[in-house]
Amino acid sequence: MNIKDVNAAMSKTDLYNRELSWLAFNRRVLEEAANPDNPLLERGKFLSICGTNLDEFFMVRVGSLAHAVAMGDKKKDPSGMTPQQQLDAIFPAVEAQVARQYELLNEEYLPALEEAGIYLLSRNQLNGEQREWLSHYFDSQVQPLLTPRAIDDKRPFPLLSAKRLHIALLLPPADRSGALRMALIPVPSSLPRVTMLPMGKGTARGVLIEEVISLFAHRLFGRAKPVAVLPFRITRNADFIYNDSDADALIVEMRKNLKKRKWGRVLRLEAPTGGDTQLLSRLKKYLDVSEQGVFQVPGPLNLDFFMKQLADLPGFDGLRFPPFTPRLDERFRQQGSIFRAIRGGDILLNHPYDSFDPVVRFLSEAADDPNVMAIKQTLYRVSGKSPLVSALGRAAQNGKQVTVLIEVRARFDEENNINWCLELEKAGCHVFYGVPKLKTHSKITLVVRREATGLRRYVHLATGNYNDVTARLYTDMGLFTCDEAIGRDAGNFFNVVTGYGESTEMEKLVAAPTHLRREVKRLIQRERDHALAGLPARITAKINALVDPKIIHQLYKAADAGVEIDLIVRGICCLKTGGRPNLRVRSIVGRFLEHTRAFVFENGGEQEVYLSSADWMPRNLDKRVELMFPVEDPVLQRRIVASLQDELKDNLKAWNMKKSGRYVRAKREEPLFNSQEARVLGPAEIAAPVE
């Protein structure tokens, strides 16, 4: 099925395919590499992000579809496409996206770097002095780490790691009557991807490590000078079905799953354009990769070095976003405990514009406060050196009752989370690995403190992970509160997820998978009823992904009834605006990754505002433990509404969905407005007095 046939098939349904929608989102990410509004070294980051996004897309989404095809699954998705039809559409779309990625790299980005004095040199561009310097570098720093591997009848092709660079070589025959021999060299991941040269034209000069190895590879094989050299990289299927019904065996099951990823089926083989055809043919055979899974690119493989190394080159501060210091609410600056500040009224944090430090302080003070009796927290993705986890361990050692639910099934964070589980258990925490058959994706912390009036519950709820690193890169919102009803709900929530308590409807918090779908349906239906009754009716929703067919069809009905609907959907959006002028979709791609889930329902003029950990996807609503929570303070409500309104008027980083489902950049009209930069430069919030 060609792309025209796919588009024709999809036009007969009222939902857009999720995989093609995701690829459209990744194209928006890629186009930021061409956006002159972004400083030069920041543009390189988007080239990197586009590539790493595609890695995960192949490992998970393409892997899942390939498995379905192998099992003979012909079930159609909500957009009307079978697994095979989706794969047939995905590969040409990826091919076109990769072609655009390297077009930007070669025709725009690398020339712009050279104008700025940064040169990425191939081995053919090196002068004698540079070759001599690299020769010494290879002998002293590189060669001791290399382990060439011969491939022949007695030494079979090895199991290769995914996403790691390798170099394939053809060597001369051992004798005149023999055939060309093959060898492999794994590129050491411990070496910098770009070797920086101390001499030459420009301010900074670098050579990719695979170029250095290829240049001097002959020194590894005695007198046998390689006939051909070909860097390559593979992506494997990392999507596996595992048994998560037994909580006691979950750690063992996940460790088995991690091992399986090492030998998952090869879905993609990347190699440079113009490489030796015999080498490429042998690799395709040994790796058993399909013809459509072979991607030859006119440039370096794996462009993540732009983000991991070149973006931080010293001496080029003018080519990066100016650094900024996150704001700190005045209530946190005043003397006294953080609990006193929270008692003064609910506090909203809008990261990364507001500092994440109060969240760390919340846990740290709770760990050391003699009046704190218990701490309970859910963790999904945490940093490698998390101060939050350290505080939890210290709290347990200080004799407090510490309960932590760490989701060990958080994809690609499994190993990190398993290690944290073991460390917290050693510290004396009560650790739960997750709820059987459900991923726990909610973000909630409960601190129980003994005070003069009795026990008081302090709660932190958030839209994003308890991760001090990503809190500087992702936009998310969090709420500190000691509201009694929310405190009771939080206690009930933890009783359910850590025990055998039956889930009941809570006073203010709304949990998935038991009640969230029903509540979202009710809120949308209420707006529809108001519109039919002639009352003010509007929905403004900001989410990462909109996939759920039932929610989408409810939005269609609400729009048809006259509800004004603005959807700010960063990534996948299976909804089609069609001919509905009052149903609008936009996506914002900028300096920070938009991750907040926020919802405003007009409610006939009595606005209700919610934040949530959940996107509107079947997995979030039906297969995960999620939370949605109200923001009831009028001042905080206005902050959230103003934030969403800023994003609706953004005309520098926003893309609008057209009737066809295609996205186009928002029209640049005066005044030009970038919602993210406006928040970076905006004044600190005026704090309410502390009682």
Image (tube, rainbow, N blue to C red):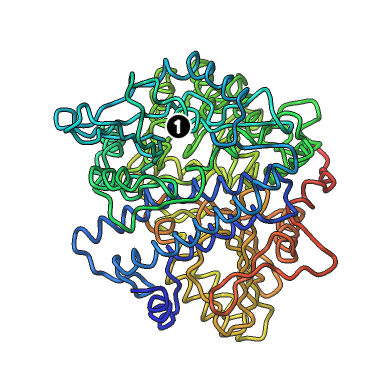
Q: Dot 1: what SS?
A: strand
Residue 179 appears in the picture as rendered? yes
Quarter-of-image position of residue 130 = top right
Residue 28 in percent (x, y) is at 59, 60
The residue under label 1 is which amino acid type? Answer: Val
As displayed, is residue 248 above or below residue 562? above
Q: Residue at x 85, y 65 (%)?
A: 671
Q: Nearer the viewer, residue 371 or 275?
A: 275
The N terminus - image quarter: bottom left
Drawn side of residue 319 relative to residue 474, left or right: right
Drawn side of residue 656 relative to residue 232, left or right: right
As displayed, is residue 629 above or below residue 322? below
As displayed, is residue 124 above or below residue 568? above
User: How many callouts does the rendering have?
Assistant: 1
Q: Nearer the viewer, residue 7 or 357?
A: 7
The C terminus - image quarter: top right
Residue 691 appears in the picture as rendered? no
Residue 216 in percent (x, y) is at 45, 25
Quarter-of-image position of residue 155 = top left
Residue 483 in percent (x, y) is at 63, 45
Drawn side of residue 219 relative to residue 242, left or right: right
Q: Nearer the viewer, residue 669 or 490?
A: 669
Q: Residue at x 40, y 20 (%)?
A: 219
Quarter-of-image position of residue 368 = top right
Q: Residue at x 75, y 54 (%)?
A: 37
Q: Nearer the viewer, residue 73 or 28?
A: 28
Determine which residue is flagged by label 1. 404
As displayed, is residue 616 above or below residue 3? above
Label 1 Cα crowd, 10 Å radius (few <14 / some 14-19 / many 20+): many
